[in-house]
């Protein structure tokens, strides 16, 4: 049992100050490798949501932030990018402590996060309106792109800082102010990041972080009348609740939701590369990624051979301390998620799927008391089974054979989600055709899990809407105004539309 006194204690960041929850309540956040609490986080409620939104609103309408030029905003973001780059490893170590993902992966993410800030820093002063060639004489008409106001960013636990940065960088570049609500399982890193926000010279209230339980403080933010937009990443079940609440307030939303992505291996593929891609799709980050290639579709002609190799590869994967450079599979982020994954394994078995690897909680010595699940592969899966239809968010792979392209497309698209898909083939015609026919926001051909701030990322179908990354997406944080100016002294008839 951990003594509360020995735990690190965090405070929320509101209006440029680190503060406790108005109630004074806190909750413990756990280290999934040690399977015990390591820090205390403020349990904010509606009073804290209101404090943060009011601060963000004040910062949006008055003071230093709206007075800045776009270039000055960009300069602040650039400073933040440099500070993030300098502290990338320290931030990553906190992420690992909180969510158990590998330090190698998290330090890559935090270092790359700096690039998101740099990119949108550069875009801040390239938001240009247009002069429109009107069909009516006597007018000069132009457009301006303006920020929305207070943006609420609600993010999940699997890549806490990177996913916050995907929203923060464009929202700030566009001139909005922000309230970030990290997951209750991984709040520490966002609060650490606020020290860098302060150092970068953002005026008080421009960026705020509040912490607490989703349905409490998260919903209070969504329902707050001064909030203009909710940028959400998380499960489709939560997304639906937020969308409904946002609709009542007529607020803008972007939704980055879950997936059940097919990773499709044809018999003409480079099978070594495909093997690596399939493993990265389901075992990297212990399968806790929205783009997990959790359905492996293998052409029947190579099914048994490929499955044998895959099982051998996955069996040899090293589990253990996520801080160790040798570890390939870390723990599951939190206890409810561990239980959810184990429950899905039971569901798959009950449905008649055949476990060919794993299928239980891991109890290897190197896993200690941690929340580990053995890499799990089910063969003989029918795509209509729940294990093939529902997002598990863990190292659990469903293997489904297919006959030809049509069959692969039919099975690949036969889920409610459409976040990503992988295709492995050497045939260029097939590569293009599959990329066109798969209903997914991202299609990877002969690669998997590639991502860049330059390329749009987001979902089809129940995986959401709105895109993150790329020049166009800054418009998700802007609204356009049309300005009409009369250039003639003539006074038109006031009773007729001009
Ligand atoms: P979640 O939906 O449980 O929680 C996400 C966030 O929403 C958390 O901050 C949580 O506190 C908050 N929340 C929960 N209930 C709320 C409510 N009623 N009102 C307001 N806020 C609420 O998701 P999770 O378990 O943290 O994350 C895993 C999910 O996120 C998976 O479905 C995964 O696919 C998805 N995800 C999607 C992407 C993407 O870009 N598409 C990226 C990463 C993760």
Image (cartoon, grey):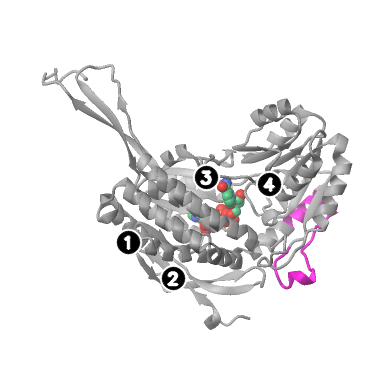
Magenta-colored stretch includes residue 359: yes
Task: Check if mark 2's residue and mark 4's residue have beta carbons within 8 Å.
Answer: no
The part of the chain drawn in magenta is 343-372
For label 4, the residue is: 390
Compared to residue 323, the image places residue 143 above or below, namely above
Nearest to the observer: residue 180 or residue 104: 104
The percent position of residue 345, horizontal first and vertical second, equals: 76, 55
In the rendering, which numbered label is found on residue 453?
A: 3
Cα distance between the residues tagged 2 and 3: 30 Å
In the rendering, which numbered label is found on residue 11?
A: 2
Cα distance between the residues tagged 3 and 1: 27 Å
Residue located at (56% from left, 67% from top) = 94
Q: Mark 1 or mark 4: name the one nearer the start of the chain.
A: 1
The percent position of residue 410, horizontal first and vertical second, equals: 73, 31
Q: Left or right of 274: which side holds 210?
A: left
For label 1, the residue is: 204
């Amino acid at each position: 049992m951990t003594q509360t006194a020995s735990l690190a204690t965090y405070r929320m960041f509101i209006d440029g100050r680190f503060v406790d929850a108005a109630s004074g309540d806190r909750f413990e956040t756990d280290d999934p490798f040690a399977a015990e609490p390591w820090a205390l986080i403020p349990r904010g409620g509606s009073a804290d949501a209101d404090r943060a939104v009011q601060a963000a609103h004040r910062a949006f309408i008055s003071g230093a932030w709206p007075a800045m030029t776009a270039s000055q905003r960009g300069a602040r973001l650039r400073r933040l990018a440099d500070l993030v780059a300098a502290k990338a490893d320290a931030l990553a170590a906190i992420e690992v402590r909180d969510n158990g993902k590998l330090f190698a992966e998290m330090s890559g993410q935090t270092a790359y996060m700096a690039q998101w800030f740099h990119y949108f820093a550069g875009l801040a002063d390239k938001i240009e309106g247009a002069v429109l060639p009107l069909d009516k004489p006597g007018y000069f008409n132009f457009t301006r792109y303006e920020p929305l106001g207070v943006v609420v960013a609600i993010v999940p636990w699997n890549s806490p800082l990177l996913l916050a940065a995907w929203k923060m960088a464009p929202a700030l570049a566009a001139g909005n102010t922000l309230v970030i609500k990290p997951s209750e399982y991984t709040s520490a890193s966002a609060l650490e990041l606020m020290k860098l926000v302060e150092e970068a010279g953002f005026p008080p209230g421009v960026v705020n972080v509040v912490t607490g339980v989703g349905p409490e403080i998260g919903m209070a933010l969504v329902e707050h009348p001064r909030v203009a937009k909710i940028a959400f990443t998380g499960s489709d079940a939560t997304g639906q609740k937020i969308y409904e609440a946002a609709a009542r307030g007529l607020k803008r939303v972007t939704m980055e939701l879950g997936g059940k992505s097919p990773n499709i291996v044809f018999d003409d593929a480079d099978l070594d590369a495909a093997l690596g891609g399939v493993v990265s799709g389901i075992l990297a980050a212990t399968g806790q990624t929205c783009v997990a290639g959790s359905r492996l579709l293998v052409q029947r002609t190579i099914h048994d051979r490929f499955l044998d190799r895959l099982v051998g590869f996955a069996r040899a994967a090293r589990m253990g301390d996520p801080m160790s450079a040798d570890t390939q599979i870390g723990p599951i982020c939190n206890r409810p998620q561990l239980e959810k994954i184990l429950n899905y394994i039971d569901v798959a078995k009950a449905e008649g799927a055949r476990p060919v690897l794993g299928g239980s909680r891991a109890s290897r010595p190197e896993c200690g008391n941690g929340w580990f699940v053995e890499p799990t592969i089910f063969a003989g899966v029918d795509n209509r089974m729940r294990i093939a239809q529902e997002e598990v968010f863990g190292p659990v792979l469903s293997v489904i054979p297919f006959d030809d392209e049509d069959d692969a497309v039919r099975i690949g698209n036969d889920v409610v989600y459409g976040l990503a898909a992988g295709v492995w083939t050497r045939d260029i015609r097939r590569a293009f055709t599959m990329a066109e026919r798969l209903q997914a926001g991202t299609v990877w051909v002969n690669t998997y899990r590639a991502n860049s701030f330059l390329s749009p990322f987001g979902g089809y179908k129940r995986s959401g809407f709105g895109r993150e990354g790329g020049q166009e997406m800054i418009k998700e944080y802007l609204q356009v105004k049309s300005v009409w100016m009369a250039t003639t002294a003539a006074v038109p008839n006031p009773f007729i539309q001009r």
